[in-house]
Image (cartoon, coloured by chain):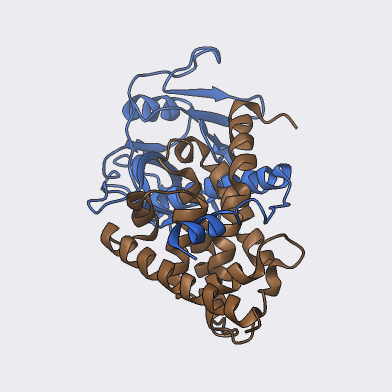
């Protein structure tokens, strides 16, 4: 498909970052299919504004932010009809069925989804997209110090959660 | 499990979840997004002009010039009597107005300023395209006027101006159009051409006849 220079640059960006963006959005919305839909829409908007997005200091953060905005917009449109719970608050969600069929570690994914929403987003942006604190703060619209605080609490909670899970699996 | 082991374990999840949407599908959707943005901008611009009955500007005269000379505007009479006005830049409104009047179109043209206060809206309910005036979308703007199809006693008022189009950080999917440059932080500001046309009552003060 001939899409010109702009398209070739975009294709390179898409192939190099789509999986990380999908995982980052997946951690926020808790469902792989929904995340894939949102990320595809965000990449489409990135293509439509590629001249600006390609100059963005953190284009992957732009894509993730756009995907989450799309998610919020859709939720607002449906809010009178559908109540969408925070995926992290769903009891008994084993290994988050939304990622079934992938090789994602179900224990880590479940532990991530048990974090509060903002902590999940900070972990995803910092660890999956490798964004620094300032870009993470910019993408989420919060202060850099708040990013550090969320990350510290998230790591502590994840460690406790995973250690607890391992102790349950290991017979005394 | 120490922090390093934990961070490594979390980072290792990258590339284990695969995005399967083909890039061609994303680009196809991107084309649709881009097309819708253009339509929205154009609709906003035309609506702004129609609502304000705006005026315009013009730079240099260019009536009846060959098509290969890209002037601010050109006026060309077709064999069927229709007069095509192609506007590329908002310059020399007076020159365009004179050219149109010389071609038998009672016209009032203003660019970037208030419309002629002597002009009065043509009364009644009328449809512009069914009254001999067609306005194309996109640039350059082409206005097709059929003088013989204009309602009795009607003239054509043409107005154009530049507006500011911008979006707000965090909401890139929404484009706002304003006649004023936004003061609050916005993600990007571009100037867009707004061009409109309408029917007015022909009179010596408004349309010259």
Which quarter of the image is occupied by the C terminus of chain A?
bottom right
Q: Note whether residue B81 is visible.
A: no
Q: Position of residue B110 (x, y in %)?
A: 33, 37
In the image, B36: left or right of A104? left
In the image, B193: left or right of A96? left
Q: Please tell me which residue is depicted at 65% across the width and 64% down the height of the picture.
A: A105
Q: Position of residue A131 (x, y in %)?
A: 42, 49
Q: Colour of chain A?
A: brown
In the image, A100: left or right of B49? right
**The chain shown in blue is which?**
B
Q: Please tell me which residue is depicted at 52% across the width and 51% down the height of the picture.
A: A63
Q: Please tell me which residue is depicted at 42% across the width and 24% down the height of the picture.
A: B99
Q: Nearer the viewer, residue B144 or B118?
A: B144
Q: Nearer the viewer, residue A15 or B208?
A: A15
Is residue A112 positioned above or below B39 on the image?
Answer: below
Which quarter of the image is occupied by the N terminus of chain A?
top right
Is residue B155 positioned above or below B184 on the image?
Answer: above
């Amino acid at each position: 498909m001939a899409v010109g220079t702009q398209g070739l640059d975009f294709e390179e960006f898409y192939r190099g970052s789509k999986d990380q963006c999908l995982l980052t959005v997946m951690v926020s919305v808790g469902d792989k299919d929904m995340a894939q839909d949102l990320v595809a829409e965000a990449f489409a908007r990135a293509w439509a504004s590629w001249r600006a997005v390609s100059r963005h200091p953190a284009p992957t953060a732009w894509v993730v932010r756009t995907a989450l905005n799309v998610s919020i917009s859709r939720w607002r449109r449906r809010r009178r009809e559908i109540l969408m719970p925070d995926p992290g608050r769903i009891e008994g969600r084993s290994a988050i069925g939304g990622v079934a069929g992938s090789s994602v570690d179900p224990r880590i994914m479940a532990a991530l989804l048990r974090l509060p929403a903002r902590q999940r987003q900070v972990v995803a942006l910092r660890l999956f997209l490798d964004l620094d604190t300032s870009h993470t703060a910019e993408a989420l619209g919060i202060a850099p110090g708040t990013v550090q605080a969320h990350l510290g609490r998230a790591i502590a909670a994840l460690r406790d959660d995973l250690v607890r899970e391992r102790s349950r699996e290991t017979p005394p | 499990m120490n922090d390093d082991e934990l961070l490594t374990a979390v980072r290792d999840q990258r590339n284990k979840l695969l995005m399967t949407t083909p890039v061609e599908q994303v680009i196809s959707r991107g084309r649709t997004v881009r097309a819708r943005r253009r339509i929205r901008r154009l609709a906003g611009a035309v609506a702004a002009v129609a609502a304000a009955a705006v005026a315009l500007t013009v730079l240099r005269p260019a009536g009846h010039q060959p098509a290969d000379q890209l002037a601010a505007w050109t006026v060309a009479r077709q064999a069927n009597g229709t007069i095509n006005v192609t506007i590329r830049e908002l310059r020399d409104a007076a020159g365009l107005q004179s050219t149109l009047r010389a071609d038998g179109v009672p016209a009032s043209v203003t660019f970037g300023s208030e419309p002629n206060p002597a002009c009065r809206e043509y009364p009644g309910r009328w449809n512009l395209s069914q009254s001999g005036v067609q306005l194309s979308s996109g640039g350059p703007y082409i206005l097709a006027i059929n003088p013989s199809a204009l309602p009795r006693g009607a003239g054509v008022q043409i107005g154009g101006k530049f507006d500011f189009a911008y979006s707000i950080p965090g909401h890139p999917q929404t484009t706002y159009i304003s006649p004023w440059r936004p003061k609050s932080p916005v993600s990007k500001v571009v100037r867009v051409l707004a061009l409109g046309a309408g029917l007015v009552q022909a009179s010596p003060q408004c349309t010259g006849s």
